[in-house]
Amino acid sequence: MNKEDFKKIAYPETYANEKELHDIFSFMRKKDPVSWVEPDEYRPFWAITKHEDIIEIEKQNELFINDPRTTLMDIPTEDAIKEFTGGSHLLVRSLVHMDNPDHQLYRSLTQKWFAPPNLESLKKDIRNIAKEYVNKMVDHGNECDFAKDVAIFYPLRVIMSILGVPKEDEPRMLRLTQELFGGRDEDMIRDESETSSESNTITDFFEYFTALTEDRRKNPTNDVSSVIANAQINNEQLGHLEAMSYYVIIATAGHDTTSSSTAGGILALIENPEQLSKLKNNPSLMTSAVEETIRWVTPVKNFFRTATQNYNLKDREIKKDDSILLCYPSGNRDEEIFDDPFKFKVDRSPNRHLAFGHGAHLCLGKYLAKIEMEIFYEELFKKIDNIELNGEPEWVKASFVSGLKSLPIRYTLQ
């Protein structure tokens, strides 16, 4: 392996091959943890692969900002977005694109909704949804595709109920999310004959949530959509772009990442049957098992930051306006932080994983995701005994948010 291989961390196809991805990151951590990478058809960037360096950057929000470059896109996609928007580099402007003071102001609008005290009141509803999907597994007999039949739908139903999207519209939300996060995966993207596929997907999202906003302003209810539709910043209603973007980030990241983690956890338990036995014999390990699952999967693969001034990191001079890619899967396998990092351990403690980010941009939905997963696994292991693979797992070809798209399993019922 050599530095030429570093380019591969930009390409969606690499994220569908976990062994190759982790081999590259391991090499980078050892040989060149702050690497200047120039992938074909991408603007160059610094790749940050060590846990401590990712934290060092994430905790300095004034020195390393989210705008203007947030996620990995090739140059043709960036150009298509600018053409579609008339020059802007952004199709959406959500919390992940914002810096202070806007970030803090907009985050505060829904923060209470996703805080532990409020989520406690939702646990009963979440458990009922979990039971529904576990029962669907039982109805399947003794086999299913866990990723396609269960994992994508359970978190979708949870977040849509919180957002206030009717159940009959969930297939539309799922399709649009897969198109947005699907990278180059042929099973996710729109018809290749369509130009600016990502722009078309965002347009569809905006049309849907514009109608929802109009309804919630006339008929507010007790859901997050009503909060967004009627929110004000500095005594003014949210701008259209910011309001629509708020819906989109909750509707997409609110389920896709949890789906990936839930499915990835099942695969990890299948591949490590001694860990499954340990968890089933000691249910008190569920909280640490979920944390380990999230570390193991790391569904959000990276975010960018942009330097606002020159900065020295590990004797590398990052220059003002340079792009910096924070490589979360690499940080979560850092040998200096995690004991035996390539071993899945349901009782891992401490577990200082970076899957939710760090600092001011810590994931808004982190507590919801963990509650969903704990409740689902609790209900699952009440009904399901042994689990094994029933085919080859497949991963989504996407470099931003990625996980299993197929997990055929066979199981026995208790």
Image: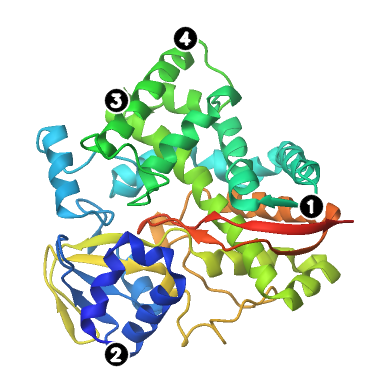
Q: Secondary structure at mark 2?
A: helix
**Residue 240: mark:** 3
The residue indicated by pointer 1 is: 142
Q: Could you give the CA–CA distance between mark 3 and mark 4, rounded to whole angstroms?
A: 17 Å
Residue type marked 4:
Lys
**Closer to the N terminus: mark 3 or mark 4?**
4
Label 1 SS? loop
Q: Quadrant of residue 266?
A: bottom right
Inspect this view and state whether residue 59 appears: no
Real-space Cα distance between discs 4 and 2?
59 Å
Q: Earlier in the sequence, mark 4 or mark 1?
A: 1
Q: Identify the residue shown where x is 17% and y is 44%.
A: 89
Callout 1 amino acid: Asn
The residue labelled by disc 4 is 218
Label 2–label 1 contact, CB within 8 A: no
Q: Is residue 323 left or right of residue 410?
A: left
Q: Nearer the viewer, residue 266 or 141?
A: 141
Q: Find residue 74 and report its image quarter.
A: bottom left
Q: Is residue 387 left or right of residue 308?
A: right
Is residue 367 at all visible to an observer of this figure?
yes
> How far apart are the two marked residues, 2 and 1, measured between alpha carbons?
47 Å
* Disc 1 crowd, CA 10 A, few/some/many (<14, 14-19, 20+): some
